[in-house]
């Protein structure tokens, strides 16, 4: 019986000359993902493609893996060459056809490469059977394929007609692939990472792809990271680690733990964020090891503000992109116009100008622009569902205009440039994008109050088979569109039915919009970073946005006291006035709100996802005429200046008046 070799990083050195001809197929092509490794045994003057050997009908693998050509003995290979030299290929009409259809009554014989061109199916499993076009296995048809359709690898449009060159996932029926695309994907991902790009199914997907002739390598090139520092790694083979072993310590950490040398961080760690993460992880884990508290490597994840701040370091302060906005209603149009410019560069600072604003303070304008932009985007036609838990909507015009990509790009720009948290993604949408939380299943709440949700709710609430059949009949149009119209014999089967319908409606039919939305979120590298810190970013995308309270506002601001002791006493009294005002504001006893106060001091009514830079601060000033002493602010520095006044009543009156007047001016 033949057996596939395990591809490792330590393959025996067998040299292949690209000009030498394979002794079986008589071709000199060197294309590993199509014909397998091209191998030359120089001492025997023998060159073969590995797949030509595997698929040859008259040869067995009788040797060990390290013998001759991965267990195919030289004498056996020569016998197969002599046998095939008497057989003529039905395609190229030349001799040397070593591969025959596995159906005994079929007499089709080909060279392995000719078989590929004639749509032979070669199954890289069991006895490695081959099937001609007439007897090749086929996939089951889907009566209602989801639209729009594209190849889930190359994203090019694909016609949903099953054929030799068009394959689909057997589980979700929503992922379609060009054969060449899925083969390249399999060759790159290998068995440990090859799975459906949409539903992430691995076992059934791999079995189906093997059945349909896709070669999936079994590479054991997994990198095991040092359980202490996490910044160095080793191949399992290189360190003789078994599959179940995960505890490995690099030489530097081992020496440090044993006290033989000081701990040093890797010299290739460049960004401040990465440096902090590595230092935290290294010293925490070494300490934990000495205490024998843990048995595996701990991970200290970065917070979302840290990640966003690291991404913001890419933005150039010397170059800017001008964004001209008519008014708050024209924010989205202005943003799209800037994004669609041929020379648009996301790494430039945003220079925002409101045409009706005479002051044109750039920091205030930018924060106002990003805040309004997020509000407009959540109302975009590409989103649907309840407030605060939006899903992607399927909109053909938005697809044609590539609006999914543009909205994703604008959201990424907003977060990295200092915009507010989004807070309106549904858990289903967040999971579809980032696969977190992994155990989340779509629910009726994700659909909102729609006719479709009402029909599905009737199925959920059915208490008898009669009610269930009536509910299914009422929702038949939706069930047929989702490919879920089927006979139900037990009441308990309704749960799986509902799960399939929700999965189709919220995920499968949206595969192309999701792909383009992801591509947009890759702007400035955001998508990749969120994938690495999915838990930390969940509140940024899904919310709800944390409500401002007296305590949270106090924690935002640092207090700058004067050096003179006498002045400090007056400032401490004013600080107590400030705290009392915040508590009364929290109780609704002030004319202004926390949002008004924050906008006055920082030019935004929400704490940005990236945090405030610099940290908001408070200082104090005295006036010879208390009746004219009103609060001041420098939003560029997130700085609030409070007047020193003789009583709390006057302090509150002046603060209320200032904030309300400022709020009115903002709305004009």
Image: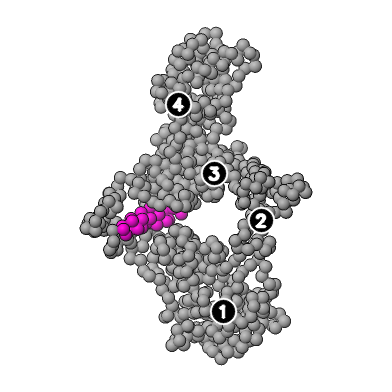
Which residue in the structure is indicated by mark 3?
A: 346
> Where is mark 2, residue-wise?
248
- Disc 1 residue crowd, few under 14, some 14–19, many 20+, Cα 10 Å: some
Q: Position of residue 256 (x, y in %)?
A: 73, 48
Q: Position of residue 85 (x, y in %)?
A: 58, 89
Pick whichever of labels 4 and 1 is earlier in the sequence: 1
The residue lying toward the viewer, choosing from 297 and 139, is: 297
Q: Secondary structure at mark 2?
A: loop
Classify residue 248 by image quadrant.
Answer: bottom right
Residue receiving disc 4: 594
**Earlier-in-chain disc, 3 versus 2:** 2
Tell me residue 569's x, y (percent).
Answer: 59, 13
Residue that protrudes farthest toward the front in the picture: 292
| Quadrant occupied by the N terminus | bottom right
Compared to residue 142, the image places residue 338 above or below, namely above
Crowd band around label 3 with a 10 angstrom C-alpha radius: few (<14), some (14–19), many (20+):
many
User: Residue drawn at (56%, 16%), measured in percent from left and top?
Assistant: 572
Crowding at dot 2, Cα within 10 Å, few <14 / some 14-19 / many 20+, comes out as many
- Evaluate whether residue 450 shows in this view: yes
Q: CA distance from mark 4 to mark 1?
A: 73 Å
* Cβ atoms at labels 4 and 2 below 8 Å apart: no
**Residue pointed to by mark 1:** 2
Magenta residues, start to end: 492-515
Q: CA distance from mark 3 to mark 2?
A: 41 Å
- Whether pointer 4 and pointer 1 mark residues with C-beta atoms closer than 8 Å, the reply is no
């Amino acid at each position: 019986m033949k057996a596939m070799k395990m591809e490792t990083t330590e393959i025996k050195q067998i040299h292949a000359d690209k000009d030498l001809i394979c002794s079986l197929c008589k071709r000199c092509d060197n294309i590993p993902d199509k014909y397998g490794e091209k191998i030359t045994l120089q001492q025997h003057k023998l060159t073969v493609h590995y797949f030509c050997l595997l698929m040859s009908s008259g040869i067995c693998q009788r040797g060990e893996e390290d013998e001759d050509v991965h267990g195919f003995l030289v004498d056996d290979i020569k016998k197969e060459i002599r046998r095939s030299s008497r057989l003529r290929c039905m395609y190229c009409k030349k001799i040397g056809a070593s591969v025959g259809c596995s159906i005994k009554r079929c007499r089709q014989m080909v060279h392995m490469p000719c078989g590929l061109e004639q749509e032979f199916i070669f199954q890289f499993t069991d006895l490695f059977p081959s099937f001609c076009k007439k007897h090749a296995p086929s996939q089951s048809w889907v009566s209602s394929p989801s639209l729009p359709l594209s190849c889930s690898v190359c994203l090019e449009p694909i016609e949903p007609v099953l054929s030799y060159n068009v394959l689909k996932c057997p589980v979700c029926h929503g992922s379609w692939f060009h054969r060449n695309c899925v083969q390249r994907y399999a060759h790159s991902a290998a068995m440990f990472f090859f799975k459906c790009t949409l539903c992430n199914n691995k076992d059934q997907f791999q079995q189906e792809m093997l059945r349909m002739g896709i070669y999936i390598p079994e590479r054991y090139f997994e990198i095991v990271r040092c359980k202490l520092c996490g910044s160095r790694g080793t191949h399992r083979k290189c360190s003789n680690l078994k599959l179940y072993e995960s505890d490995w310590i690099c030489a530097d950490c081992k020496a440090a733990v044993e006290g033989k040398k000081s701990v040093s961080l890797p010299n290739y760690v460049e960004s401040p964020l990465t440096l902090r993460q590595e230092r935290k992880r290294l010293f925490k884990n070494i300490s934990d090891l000495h205490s024998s508290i843990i048995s595996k490597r701990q991970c200290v994840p970065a917070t979302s503000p840290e990640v966003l701040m690291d991404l913001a370091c890419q933005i150039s302060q010397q170059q800017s992109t001008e964004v001209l906005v008519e008014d708050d209603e024209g924010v989205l149009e202005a943003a799209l116009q800037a994004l669609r410019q041929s020379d648009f560069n996301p790494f430039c600072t945003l220079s925002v100008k409101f045409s009706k604003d005479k002051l044109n303070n750039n920091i205030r304008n930018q924060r106002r622009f990003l805040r309004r932009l997020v509000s407009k985007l959540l109302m975009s036609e590409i989103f649907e569902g309840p407030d605060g838990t939006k899903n992607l909507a399927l909109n053909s015009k938005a697809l044609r205009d590539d609006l999914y990509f543009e909205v994703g790009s604008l959201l990424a720009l907003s977060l990295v440039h200092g915009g507010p948290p989004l807070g309106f993604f549904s858990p289903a949408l967040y999971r579809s994008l980032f696969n977190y939380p992994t155990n989340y299943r779509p629910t009726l709440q994700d659909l909102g109050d729609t006719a479709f949700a009402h029909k599905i709710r009737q199925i959920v609430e059915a208490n008898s088979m009669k009610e269930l059949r009536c509910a299914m009949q009422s929702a038949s149009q939706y069930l047929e569109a989702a490919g879920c119209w089927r006979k139900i014999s037990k009441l308990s089967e309704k749960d799986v039915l509902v799960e399939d319908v929700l999965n189709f409606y919220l995920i499968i039919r949206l595969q192309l919009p999701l792909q383009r939305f992801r591509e947009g979120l890759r702007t400035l590298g955001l998508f990749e970073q969120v994938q690495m810190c999915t838990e930390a970013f969940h509140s940024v995308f899904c919310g709800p946005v944390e409500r401002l309270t007296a305590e949270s506002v106090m924690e935002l601001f640092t207090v700058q006291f004067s050096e003179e002791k006498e002045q400090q006493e007056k400032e401490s009294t004013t600080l107590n006035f400030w705290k009392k005002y915040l508590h009364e504001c929290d109780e609704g006893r002030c004319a202004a709100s926390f949002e008004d106060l924050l906008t006055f001091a920082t030019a935004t009514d929400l704490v940005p996802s990236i945090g405030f830079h610099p940290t908001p601060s408070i200082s104090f000033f005295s006036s010879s005429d208390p009746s004219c002493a009103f609060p001041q602010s420098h939003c560029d520095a997130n700085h609030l200046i409070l007047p020193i006044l003789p009583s709390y009543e006057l302090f509150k009156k002046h603060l209320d008046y200032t904030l309300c007047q400022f709020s009115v001016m903002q709305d004009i």
